[in-house]
Amino acid sequence: MRRSPMERAAVPDRKPERAAVGEWQLGEVLHHLQDGVMVTDAETRILYVNRAFTLMTGYGEEEVLGETPRILQSGRHEADFYRAMWGAIREDGLWSGEIWHRRKDGAEHAKRLTINAIPDGRGITRNYLGVFSDISDLMRSRRELEHLASHDPLTGLPNWLLFKDRVGHALERAERLGHQLALVFLDVDHFKDINESLGHSIGDRLLRRMAERLKEGVRTEDTLARLAGDRFNVCLERVEGAEEALVSARRLHLAMAEPFQLGPHSLHLPCSIGISMFPRDGTTVEALMRNADSALHSAKEAGRNAIRFYTEELTRRADHRLRMAQELRKALDRDQLILFYQPQVEMVSGRVAGVEALVRWSHPEEGILGPASFIPLAEEMGLMSDVGRWVLRMACRQGQAWLEDGRHFGRMAVNISARQVHDGNLADGVRYALRESGLPPEYLELEITESALMDIDTGVMETLGAIRGMGVGLAIDDFGTGYSSLLYLKRLPLTKLKIDRGFVQDMASSAESRGIVRTIIALARTLDLNLVAEGVETEVQRDLLLEEEVRVGQGFLWWRPEPFPQLPCVGGRPSP
Ligand code: C2E
Ligand code: MG
Ligand code: MG
């Protein structure tokens, strides 16, 4: 019987001669090898590939001869990877590692690859030999192992290892982008009783069901994990503030409040929740986790079924703001918003030059609230457009009513928030309010704070242009506190600057403030804008302004904002 060269080689007592495997036979051996083999010349042009290569890559021999191995590149590795690989081959004549290749059909697969540089007799590399084996299966099981190491086997949620890692990354991002982050830790009250009375298998099923419910309550960018026992942990990647964290926590709390139906058992399992916030309650993963834990602890102490922030004050404040936010939504429908009016006065004659509408919230329990206590909230809750539209409509109606009454008020000034300026509907809102009320446009003036005009795009320019085009005045409010670009000031279709209260009030004591007021006055003259000095409280301030030839002032010296200012009556329809 004839033996194949391999069989002969396997017989131990007869050492074969090296020449016994002829060139043809060697080719045959390579052909049948399970590993892919590729031989290139010194320029890495492919000279030979075996059958396993063809099977693994999908490329036939005729397609790759003369090509370079680059046709197999997957794009998964950076240039550094290849640089290091070739460095090793040059230095040591050998590289070995894992590499992702792309098959001819586009599929990517992982290989274990060894490349040898084959030198000639003088040590000059003549060929490269690449041998590779498919390790996709290995990679898959490695990924499965990694998943096992980083996930809770019961619920499939991330475990504490992965959770800490995710929180770490989220913290880095929050720090870099300057936003807040919240850790929400949740613990099922009395879970031990379930395990003890109904057994662990019911307990396990329950935990799985809880995980499913909680998953529905978090956003995809947030991480829900189970760190231990009946503890679920959420990292809210990005929150605007404590209220938003509280809203999310309440949603989770609510999701758990529904009884769980497990066979014959209907299980009611309330939970306690503790929250810590970055950066307020800590700036490291450890500190935030510790503080969320202690918040959770205090929620349990508070009689369970409660939500607590790390600090009591934050709990109270977030709670209060959230309640206010909910009430604010209804305030508009319940006619709880009202407008106060504060006249602007020509300082020499005492004549009314304008009236500013200032919004108030007549809160059923807390009394009359100023804009500082609810406008930021309205902005955060996305309610500002509604509030702004309401103010605009009411102010226009009041203006028209005064006109019909023969009352002189100059112009009706309405404050516009940054959101309104940027949301694209302002021109329509103004047009609507004017048409609905019948107020002629030249009686209306919009006040926009300097900071709201900081990033103006062409959309804002068009909006302001359209509004000015109707004949409505445009004032910059709190001027001097922002960073106006002079170029923008020139380009914007403005009619008025309002000198910020701070400078007016410091004028008497600070030469610097006086200097700033003078600069603003000069600027207004150059740009041909009207001027109003805000917050004039004393005669000294008034006289200093008059010295600088500012004609119009607004402040407690003449009027406080009030709902029904006694405006002077003139015969007929007054001009603005
Ligand atoms: P603002 O537009 O600069 O309004 C002037 C603020 O200064 C008003 O405060 C007014 O009551 C107060 N003030 C007037 N004279 C004096 C004075 O002599 N001394 C002092 N210390 N203060 C004086 P208010 O009503 O609390 O409004 C605060 C800010 O809230 C306003 O500043 C305005 O930016 C905003 N705001 C008010 N109403 C609205 C509104 O309807 N929409 C929007 N977006 N913002 C509003
Ligand atoms: Mg104003
Ligand atoms: Mg102001």
Image (cartoon, rainbow, N blue to C red):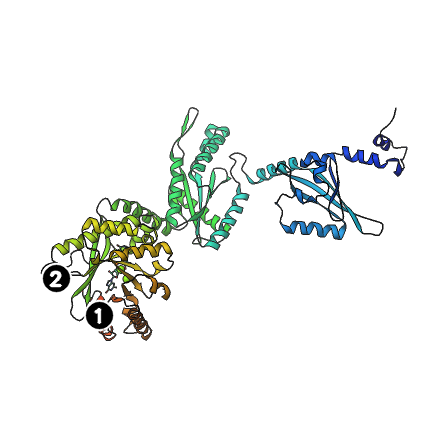
Q: Where 172 sits versus 351, above or below?
A: above
- What element does badge 2 sit on? loop
Q: In terms of image quarters, where does ligand 1 lie? A: bottom left
Q: What's under tag 2, amino acid-wise?
A: Pro
Quarter location, residue 496: bottom left
- The x, y position of residue 315, in whole percent, is 37, 49
Looking at the rendering, which quadrant does residue 355 occupy? bottom left
Q: Which residue is mark 1?
A: 551
| Residue topped by disc 2 | 568
The residue nearer to you, when weighing 27 against 248, is 27
Q: Where is 89 relative to 355, above or below?
A: above
Q: How many marks?
A: 2
Residue 175 in the image, given as x and y percentages of width and height? 48, 54
Q: Label for residue 102?
A: none
At x 21% / y 46%, what residue is drawn?
335
Q: Is residue 41 left or right of residue 326?
A: right
As drawn, 167 above or below 201: below
Q: Is mark 1 within 8 Å of ligand 1?
A: no
